[in-house]
Amino acid sequence: MWLYDGSIIEESRLEDYIGFVYVITNETNGRRYLGKKLLKFKRTKKIKGKKKKLLVDSDWRDYWGSNKVLIEEVKALGPEKFKREILRLCKARGEMNYFEAKYQFVMGVLESDDWVNEWIMVKVHRAHLKKVDFSSDDGIIKLRMTGDRDAPSSKKQAAPRKAKSWINAFGSNLFNFVVWFN
């Protein structure tokens, strides 16, 4: 089950969206994974000798991320020990890519052992974001609220890096710089 705004999301709520940005939390040790998921895939199928493009449901209902560590933890502990939360519903791929990377940079997912993320990969152009409503970005607030600071950590906290204070000082401006620079 996926949660959105604290309650189980109804599938009818997803009809206007192509995907979402999410966080999965291991409730036994507090480690988290931040990612994105498409709700539907485009597939080509031959119908009466002609190729047709179809939208088919993705595996989002049973999806546990692409991270090998997370998948192994889910297999070992069982899905009932994990919480899956949708942070932001997205109407376009560019919006989904942008907010996944933004949340990953802001939360410092590569800088702490509290996260199992191993990569941040993004390619977003300004044109991808023309129709995005940035005023409704409460995903960071939701994300910060999902962290259970009292949960025992399975590993020692990584030593803070000099760049971390720089990232915190500049926030999303660092992300804008990275996108602009590429």
Image (cartoon, rainbow, N blue to C red):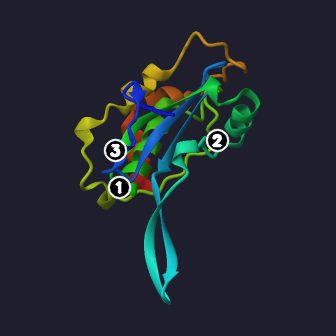
Kindly report the distance in space between the C-alpha atoms of the residues bearing marks 2 and 3. Answer: 33 Å
Say whether residue 131 is left or right of residue 152.
Answer: left
In the figure, 90 relative to 162: above or below? below
**Residue at the image point whose x is 39% and y is 32% from the top:** 170
Which kind of residue does numbered mark 1 sit on?
Ala
Q: Which residue is mark 1?
A: 92
Mark 3: secondary structure = helix
User: Which picture quadrant has residue 118?
Assistant: top right
Kindly report the distance in space between the C-alpha atoms of the residues bearing marks 1 and 2. Answer: 24 Å
Say whether residue 54 is left or right of residue 74.
Answer: left
Kindly report the distance in space between the C-alpha atoms of the residues bearing marks 1 and 3. Answer: 18 Å
User: Which picture quadrant has residue 116?
Assistant: top right
Cβ–Cβ below 8 Å for labels 1 and 2? no
Which kind of residue does numbered mark 3 sit on?
Ser
Q: Which residue is mark 2?
A: 118
* Residue 9: percent from left, percent from top: 40, 35
Nearer to us of marks 1 and 2 is 1
**Residue at the image point whose x is 44% and y is 51% from the top:** 97
**Residue at the image point whose x is 44% and y is 27% from the top:** 143
